[in-house]
Image (cartoon, grey):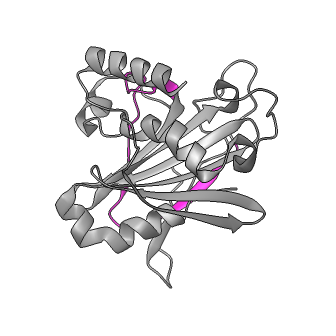
Amino acid sequence: MVGRRRTLASAAAAVCGAPMLGFAGLGLAATQGLLAGRIPGLSEPDENDRLRTYRRPDDKSGGHGVGWSPIIPYSFKVPDGWDEVPVSIADLGGTEIDLRFANPKEGRLFVIVAPVRRFADDLDDATIEKIGNPEKVITAFGPEVTGENVEGKVLSTATAEHSGRTYYQFELELPHVFITATAAGNRLYLFSVTANGLQWKRHYKDLKQIAESFRVV
């Protein structure tokens, strides 16, 4: 299964001229046209922690498909200065990349919302535990984010629970990336926060806070 996805990612990279799913240049998405619908969902900075909360608007277009229920909204927090970046149908991963955000000085993030039936049958009311344990999930789906095998690159793994939903959290090295994974309805959610070496060194705490703030609501 992982080999099939890697083959698809490699083929797409050859067509688009981008090396991997999560780390394609932001300029590509901004220039390809046929952009997914973009509806504001970012709050004003919170008075306590000065973070802004993004919540996926209920009526945002994209990713529904024939036979699929509307995407269950998700949310996360970012410092001021992070902004939405247009997602193109030419992006690797196609319509499964639901959202991109970036700050040119700090890093970037994206959200993959994939149908669970790509990975398992009879999971119309999926939980991440039904899909697998943390090791199985990162081995199978880490390449969806990095475009390459993640064996030996996982620095840490954690499990968190919020409002009865379980989240798997991973930190990977080179490329530096945090991945938060969960499932809801009939979809798998992969939330990736990444940065280059200098950004990672300077903004590690903020990047980790962003990654840990992801919720399906």
Vertical side of 123 occupied by 3: above or below: above
Instruction: Report if residue 82 is visible in the image.
Output: yes
Q: Considering the image in quadrants, where does the C terminus appear?
A: bottom right
Drawn side of residue 3 relative to residue 148, left or right: right
Magenta stretch in the rendered image = 72-95
Residue 189 appears at what percent x and percent y? 60, 44
Instruction: Single out the residue that lies furthest toward the left.
Output: 198
Q: Quadrant of residue 164?
A: bottom right
Residue 83 appears at what percent x and percent y? 37, 54
Drawn side of residue 7 relative to residue 180, left or right: left
Q: Quadrant of residue 30?
A: top left
**Residue name at image x 70 percent, y 41 percent:** 131
User: How many numbered callouts?
Assistant: 0
Q: Closest to the observer: 156 or 123?
A: 156
Q: Considering the image in quadrants, where does the N terminus appear?
A: top right
**Residue name at image x 35 percent, y 59 percent:** 82
Instruction: Report if residue 78 is visible in the image.
Output: no
Q: Closest to the observer: 143 or 30?
A: 143
Verify whether residue 74 appears in magenta.
Answer: yes
**Residue name at image x 46 percent, y 35 percent:** 144
Residue 130 appears at what percent x and percent y? 75, 44
Instruction: Single out the residue that lies furthest toward the bottom.
Output: 48
Vertical side of 175 occupied by 14: above or below: above
Verify whether residue 14 appears in magenta.
Answer: no
Residue 54 appears at what percent x and percent y? 53, 58
Drawn side of residue 85 relative to residue 73, left or right: left
